Image (cartoon, rainbow, N blue to C red):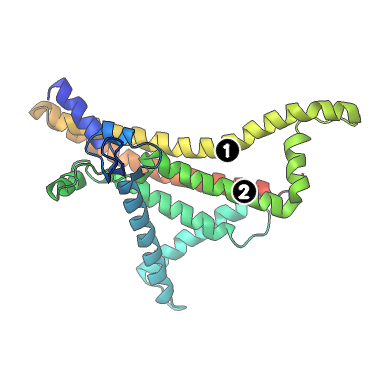
Amino acid sequence: MAGETSTGYIKHHLQNLTYGQNPTTGNWEFAQSAAEAKAMGFWAVHVDTLFWSMALGVLFLFFFHKVARRATAGIPTGLQNFAEWIVEFIDTSVRGSFSGKNDLVAPLALTIFIWVFLMNFMDLIPVDLIPWLTHAAGVEFMKVVPTTDPNATFGMAIGVFLLTIYYTIKNKGVGGFVAELTLHPFESKNMGMKIILIPVNFFLEFVSLIAKPVSLALRLFGNMYAGEMIFILIAIMLQAGLVLGAFGGLLQLGWAIFHILVITLQAFIFMTLTIVYMDMAHAEH
């Protein structure tokens, strides 16, 4: 493939299906190019990200609802055994990282782990398969891995952040929350020195507070985006002749096997950090 063709191929696969207001015509429509999508601005919607994330969320709910309805105290079925293994794994993780008492944490951890894993798992689908099918149906762009879109990862991270703030204020009060931001890490028994240290403490703690959702979102996005880019580059090799195609096929298999570990690890890290942040919201300093 020529350099320009390869570049166009990569850009096409990294472009979201975007719906927004066209600044030229004033109409709400689907963007036909990356430039149009960029011009639509902040209020544009990545339809493919919303569709696949919601579809995978429904799949998760359907699976566990089906298992719960058919659960039995006798010999479990394969699906029930698998679901119980996942629940036990999540329960162990929560017990090991969360010292407070909140019935929301375990279901939240389960939802995050399975949902993020399913979104990451879409990266193992051949990069040209679904875009080729949707293109045949008249849809120009289609990204099928929601976690390669920072809008999705930041949306989840902000949700966790808001929960953390809510439970911090609920458990420690507004005064306790403000004290955590202004009276640590530097402390002094002298009142004058304590007042002087408040701006310094606030700056350090505020940066630390904001860094939590940012790092949570960017860690997941960065790893999954890099993984998708490697799959796209390997796909280019498959079209570059017999020798490079055969080598690309071996790389594709090796990277896919390794990527199974990556997608699982990223889901686990996102879940574990969520549990840790919730534990910090319930901990008394």
Is the C-beta separation of discs 2 and 1 under 8 Å? Answer: yes
Q: Is residue 160 visible?
A: yes
Circle number at residue 145: none
- Mark 2 or mark 1: name the one nearer the start of the chain: 2
Q: Picture coordinates of residue 96 (x, y %)?
A: 61, 51
- Quick check: 211 left or right of 49? right
Q: Is residue 280 above or below residue 4?
A: below
Q: Picture coordinates of residue 39 (x, y %)?
A: 32, 33
Residue at point 46%, 52% (across, down): 113
Q: Residue furthest right?
A: 190
Task: Give SS at disc 2.
Answer: helix
Q: Quadrant of the N terminus?
A: top left
Pick the residue in front: 241 or 115: 115
- Quick check: 129 left or right of 84? left
Q: Quadrant of residue 277?
A: top right
Q: Quadrant of the C terminus?
A: top right
Q: Residue furthest top?
A: 3
Amino acid, disc 1: Lys
Q: Is residue 247 visible?
A: no
Residue at point 41%, 66% (across, down): 64
Circle number at residue 164: 2
Q: CA distance from mark 2 to mark 1?
A: 10 Å
Q: Residue furthest left?
A: 242
Residue at point 68%, 55% (across, down): 100
Q: Picture coordinates of residue 65 (x, y %)?
A: 41, 70
Task: Give SS at disc 1.
Answer: helix
| Residue on which the image places disc 1 | 212
Q: Picture coordinates of residue 188 (x, y %)?
A: 86, 30
Q: Is residue 199 above or below residue 82?
A: above
